[in-house]
Amino acid sequence: MFSRNYREKTIESVLFAVSALTVVILFLICLFLFRDGLTLFEDVPFLSFVTGKFWYPTSVNAQFGLLPLFLGSLIVTAGAILFSVPLGIASAVFISELASPKVADFLKPFVEILAGVPSVVYGFFGLVVLVPFIRETFNLPTGQTALTGSIMLGVMALPTIISISEDAISSVPGSLKQGSLALGATRWQTIYKVTVPAALSGISAAVMLGMGRAIGETMTVMMVTGNTAIIPSFPGGILDPVRTMTATIALEMGEVPQGSDHFHALFAVGSVLFIVTFLINLLADAIKKKYRFKVD
Amino acid sequence: MGLNAKTSERIAFAFLTLAALTVAGFVLFILYYIVSNGYNAISIEFLTEMPRKMMTEGGIYPAIVGTIYLIIGSMLVALPMGILAAIYLTEYAGQNRTTWAIEMAINNLAGTPSVVFGLFGLAMFVKYLGFGPSLLSASLTLGLLIIPVIIRSSEEALLAVPPEYREASLALGISKWQTIRHVVLPASIPGIVTGSILSIGRVAGETAPILLTGAAYFLPRLPDSVYSQFMALPYHLFVLATAGTNIAQTRPLQYGTALVLLMIVLAVNFVAVLVRRYYRQKLKI
């Protein structure tokens, strides 16, 4: 009996240790990212990194200004969200409220495929289809623009937004909808005055997570946005080339001498990216928890 | 007023339908475009030969093999860890601060951009542990990347096992671990397998992490050890499409590579659906 208890306890401890490894991994990511990132500030003042308007990492007087990259990520992500949020939520409402079970079962695999396509394939598709299309439509010198990136990222954020919103919408209790319908409201009135507001926390979390997905996407933006590190003007800059934080890391890491300021600057950019997505995740989590719909 | 509400309902429903059709349309267009342009490039030679003449001719054999090695390597890292963690979280963990921290860590790992995993892999595996740019560094990095996916899907599979199974077994005096091993795990295997298969698709398609941890631009031979660099399909496609010696001339090779990559991911998804369906029917009997 003693040995059996001992065995059980040992197994539980091992399982716990393995689970706790996830926390260790997160900690190690912070440690290794921040360690190399913070080294930059031995040579470059923190303020000039955060507020610097120029990213000239290889010139003689190298400048490591975060702003063009940060704003680049911001403009591309904002564009993606503007386009994918209405489309995603509308599709989620259609799948969970309008479509017959058969139609819904038919549509869901499309969303899964959209989520499964590798980002480099999206990038390639954007490069051969959307880039020439944007160039000709707007009569631009190049079709590799912030808008191109926004459209591709919008498509890529769709599955996240659709599947999480759909979960939220279909978990709204039927009694609420029936109550509304019984009062004489139409199905549409019920959807936009009862169902969607009741699912709003889940939908907001879906939007946050879609945003996280878009801001962290690398290969697609790298292939379709032209990668010019200048502060985008607004709103005209949407048709100019732009460079995101993610693309900068992936483009430049291969060519920098390890241990140089440039190397550390890329880790600093990575740290900023990590902190931003970390905050977005925490926020999404908090929204979901705080406003979780309570019945019974 | 009644007519008004009816009319606005009709308009609204038309828009919702249009939105769903647009999404389905995107998928069909992307698939059609890659398939129709890529299938001409696919041949036995394309799949089994080394790239030649600075990658303007020949096949993608080393990239296919590299991607398979990455899948095996990252699964060896992520599967045991992901499943064990899921067992702890569903069967043992109480509602306390430690569990909250673990849940939070998993959520954040799931939302961390893949390029950040790449930076981490570079700093920790390539540099600090001295594995160099290699199959080992890249497999470890991708393994960590998919752990949250495997934990989440395994958790779902374990939770789907009815509590009666556990209670019946425990009532017979069988210990908790033996109940898990001989009752709960076998019943949840289909769900766990489905989740793992889906994460294979993820590994096959990830580019940014391997770009930083060991994928080679051009390497016309197979990796001979875990410390070798390697070619992989997604990076190969990226290189051909953006940095190749002759981007226009190699267009057919690019479409071919994109199609092979897409087919691997779709096949993996399809197999996962079949596994799920097969076991569901088996469980019903």
Image (cartoon, rainbow, N blue to C red):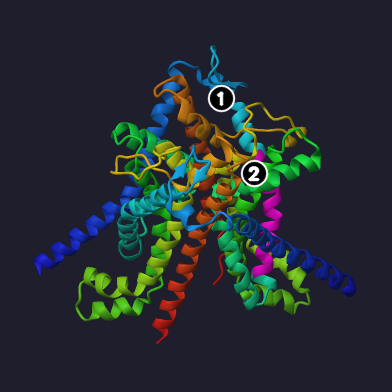
Query: Residue A39, located in which quarter of the rendered image?
Result: top left
| For marks 2 and 1 on the same chain, the one whose residue lies earlier in the sequence | 1
Residue A272 shows in this picture: no
Q: Chain of mark 1?
A: A
What numbered label is drawn on residue A50? Answer: 1
Magenta residues, start to end: A76-95
Q: Residue at x 46, y 73 (%)?
A: B274
Residue A89 falls within the magenta-colored stretch: yes
Instruction: Answer left or right for B192 relative to A280.
Output: left
**From this viewpoint, which residue is outermost toward the top?**
A60
Q: Which residue is pictured at 45% across the width and 68% down the height? A: B271
Give me the chain letter of mark 2.
A
Task: Determine the image quadrant of residue B212.
Answer: top left
Percent across and percent down for residue A199 are 63, 62
Q: In the rendered structure, which amino acid carries the disc numbered 1? A: Val
Across and down, in percent, residue A289 comes to 52, 56
* Residue occupying the point 75% across, 39% down: A135
Residue matched to label 2: A127
Predominant secondary structure, magenta span: helix
The percent coordinates of residue B276 (x first, y second) are 44, 73
Instruction: Tell me the element at label 2.
Output: helix
Q: Is residue A195 left or right of residue B212?
A: right
